[in-house]
Image: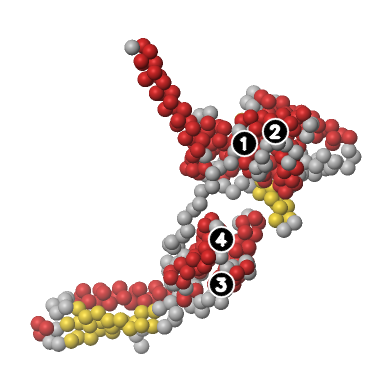
Amino acid sequence: EENIMASLITIGKGASKKYKLTWDVNTTDGTRKRKSKTFPAGTLLSTVKQFKLKVEQEYALRELQIVENTKTVGDVVEVYLETYTKFISPSTIKGYKSIIYNHKDGKGILDYWGKTYLHKITIDAAQRYVNFLVDCGLAPKSVRSYINLMSVLFQLADELSYIRRGFNPFAKLRMPPKKSKPIEVFTESELRELIEKAEKEDNEMVLLILVLGGLCGLRRGEMAGLKYENISLDDLYPEMKITESVIKVDRVIYEKAPKTAAGVRSIPLGKKTVELLKKARENYEKRKSENPDWTDSGHVLYQEDSGLAMLPKVIGRRYKKFMQSTDIPYRNLHVLRHTFASLLAKNGASPKDLQSLLGHSDSYTSIQIYTHSYKDVQRKNTMLLDHEILEKGSEVG
């Protein structure tokens, strides 16, 4: 028996003879629908047969692509977490799980979609989920995180042939507009005052935190991962190499490479920074020689009584406690990194320079974040040009 999915019949005779093709179409809910096409009188039989062959090939492809159409969102979530997260950082996985298992207001992926068949989710249903998340009070950035993860799950379902090829109702939805917050920074005088206060109080670890963040642009995890072996202090061109970051997830400590290849970078060091780091290294060696139970972790930021690496959370606490003892308004630790970038931009550093020093994957990110600083540079340049051409010109005239 021939396995033919399309049938061809002839209607009429002579000059009025027509061909009619009838065929079945697979739908994503497992049913079949019948379609037909009647060709105008005079259409060549070869043309009709070519169309018939095309229909049959498409039918065969759909058969191959839709292996199983009873899979739910919960099924894909299970496969994804068990098999496809091996090369994702623990902190990212934790973030995904907080979206998947969030039970508050029923907005988590499993609560909202868990038992829903994949093929029954339409673009309209996906858009209603976006609106629901907004109504629950989620910030635009958080809404995007939920929708992006749903899109990833549908991409996986596509790869596993759980749905028809290219079916992803979460790929193009109307999302809430992004709300850009003004970037907070310390002024030059504020940063100088903080560093001087830490020096005066001989608060070595906080001093290093301020320098690594405000003068080198390190993230908290990069501060925690920095070791003296990655810092060249005695060379003609001293620098530090950022090669790893430390995170703690569910009481487990991980040392990991930066999120992107651009995160691995070298940062040139100024004279004063080199002096501070040399003194800190001497103190590290002194404490090691005086403490028989010392753990030689080699970290720049460490626990003074043991030598154990200082975790990101502890770095944050040390910084916050110090800030609360000052008259300068409190700003979180990451503001030190913003300050580093902002001051560089104001002093003429190009977006490409910032990209390299901050470890951004592209210079567009640097421009977007530090637009306000570049506007100051642009204003300074145009005022200089105004002075050079107009004011000096009038003086000469």
Distance between the Cα atoms at labels 2 and 1? Answer: 10 Å
Q: Mark 1 points at which residue?
A: 186
| Residue indicated by mark 3 | 112
Q: In the figure, is residue 323 to the left or right of 74?
A: right
Q: Quadrant of the N terminus?
A: bottom left
Alpha carbon distance from label 3 to label 4: 15 Å
Crowd around label 4: few <14 · some 14–19 · many ≥20 (10 Å): some
At horizontal 56% and vertical 42% (from top left) the residue drawn is: 183
> For the C terminus, which image quadrant?
top left
The residue singled out by tag 4 in the image is 138
Residue at numbered disc 2? 194
Tell me which amino acid carries mark 4.
Leu
| Helix, strand or loop at mark 1 | loop
**Element type at marker 4?**
loop
Describe the element under mark 3 as helix, strand or loop: helix
Q: Which residue is drawn at 40% across and 23% down?
A: 385
Residue 41's disc is: none
The disc labelled 3 sits on which kind of residue? Tyr
- Nearest the viewer among 97 and 38 is 97
Using residue 234 as the reference point, say whether residue 307 is left or right of it.
right
Foreground mark, 3 or 4?
4
Q: Which of marks 4 and 1 is nearer the N terminus?
A: 4
For the residues labelled 2 and 1, say whether their Cβ atoms are less than 8 Å apart: yes
Q: Residue furthest top?
A: 396
Residue 318 placement, left or right of 172 = right
Q: How far apart are marks 4 and 2 (CA)?
A: 36 Å
The reply to whether discs 1 and 3 touch (Cβ–Cβ < 8 Å) is no
